[in-house]
Image: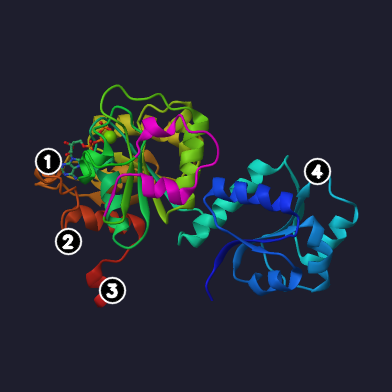
Amino acid sequence: MTSTTALLITRDELLLDDLLRLAAAAGCTLEVAHDAPAGLRAWSSATVVLVGVDLASRVAEQRPPRREQVHVVGHGPAPDDAFRHALGAGAVDVVELPGSETWLVEVLTDAGDAVAGRRAGRAHTVGVVAGSGGAGATTFACALALTAAATRAATLVDLDPLGPGADRVVGLDGADGVRWDGLVTSRGRLSSHSLRTALPAKDGLAVLTWEMGAPTELDAASVREVLSATQRGNDLVVVDLPRALDDVTAEVVTRCDRVLLVTDPTVPGVASAGKVAAVLRSLNPRVEAVVRAGRGTLPAAQVAEALGLPLVADVPRHRRLAEHVDLGLGPVHGHRSALARAARTTLGLRSRQDRVA
Ligand SMILES: Nc1ncnc2c1ncn2[C@@H]1O[C@H](COP(=O)(O)OP(=O)(O)OP(=O)(O)O)[C@@H](O)[C@H]1O
Ligand SMILES: [Mg+2]
């Protein structure tokens, strides 16, 4: 069965005009049925069903199969019997326009995203923070995102304004696409599909990073909206976070499913990571340690224990990392690289060899 984005069942021309406008704003296609039987034919294949108040009783009479995402929509306060008909049609609510326009655009945006092939749910979101300067957080964030992108839709979000730029590290330096500067000025609901296609991308990985020069100041509302759209349009989102969190980045930490603290296995490295861990834990209970092996002498298990965090991976030293990054090959050139293995372990992914075995 082919799937329709959103189905509207109405004969009300004004309502139709309004919803066509809202659907266009949401980047979603609208199939229109002018009577209940035609609506019933497209009922199950649509991602969202909008029933005009004018035809709600007719639709209810047809006893449509129960399904999620059915809304009755009309202009102004709904007539009393609209709620009874909405119940009969299996709708979850009666939506009034123009008051609920913004909400409806969100519903339609999600419908468009679902049909564009993205997962209906929210992407697993992994934040990565360095326990001390140069511990390898940006590199590991890039390794995670590149590794995941081989098998699923992944986006790397660079939230460290003073970092090298994630595009540079993954080999997308100079690639066309929108960056933070182009997003902070946009207002309103972002379509996850449009955002993903607007970002610089390569081999399944999209990257949101900064322009050269002085970084744009980000505001909480824009970052919240961008993160939400990114989460709707991907299977995995990796966020490279700065160590010194401000209000905007602290909020992002609270929205992560896991936060990885990349730590140097040295006494000073663990001391500063301990402070960062305390800040992170006050924002999110799911903080885990990644130990950058070869940068010190302390065993990884001891580092994690000292931090009071579960150990997820021991990141080995990649001898040719700088050379690969400078050549635009990225940090996980070759699936057998130790960094790719550490990324797969962290994400619980199996290698190609594992899958064949
Ligand atoms: N696993 C690794 N093997 C070898 N070199 C690495 C590894 N990880 C990072 N590096 C190198 O260490 C340096 C710092 O790495 P990176 O920028 O990833 O650290 P960071 O923790 O993000 O730093 P910052 O504190 O600036 O955010 C870079 O030159 C990078 O190439
Ligand atoms: Mg960094």
Q: Nearer the viewer, residue 247 or 60?
A: 60
Neighbor class of circle 2 (other Cα within 10 Å; few <14, some 14-19, many 20+) is few
Question: Where 108 falls versus 47 (above or below)?
Answer: above
Amino acid at dot 1: Asp
Residue carrying label 4: 76
Looking at marks 3 and 4 on the same chain, the residue that comes earlier in the sequence is marked by: 4
Eye-nearest disc, 4 or 2: 4
Question: Where 7 falls versus 210 (above or below)?
Answer: below
Neighbor class of circle 3 (other Cα within 10 Å; few <14, some 14-19, many 20+) is few
Amino acid at dot 2: Arg
Q: Is mark 4 within 8 Å of ligand 2?
A: no
- Does the stretch in magenta take in 190? yes
In this view, the residue farthest toward the top is 214
353 sits to left or right of 272: left
Looking at marks 4 and 2 on the same chain, the residue that comes earlier in the sequence is marked by: 4
Amino acid at dot 4: Gly
- Write down which quadrant ligand 1 falls in: top left
Q: Tag on residue 355? A: 3
Residue 199 visible? The answer is yes
Looking at marks 1 and 3 on the same chain, the residue that comes earlier in the sequence is marked by: 1
The residues bearing labels 1 and 2 have C-alpha atoms spaced at a distance of: 20 Å
Eye-nearest disc, 3 or 4: 4
Neighbor class of circle 4 (other Cα within 10 Å; few <14, some 14-19, many 20+) is few
SS at circle 2? loop
Q: Position of residue 14 (x, y in %)?
A: 73, 49
Q: Position of residue 121 (x, y in %)?
A: 52, 57
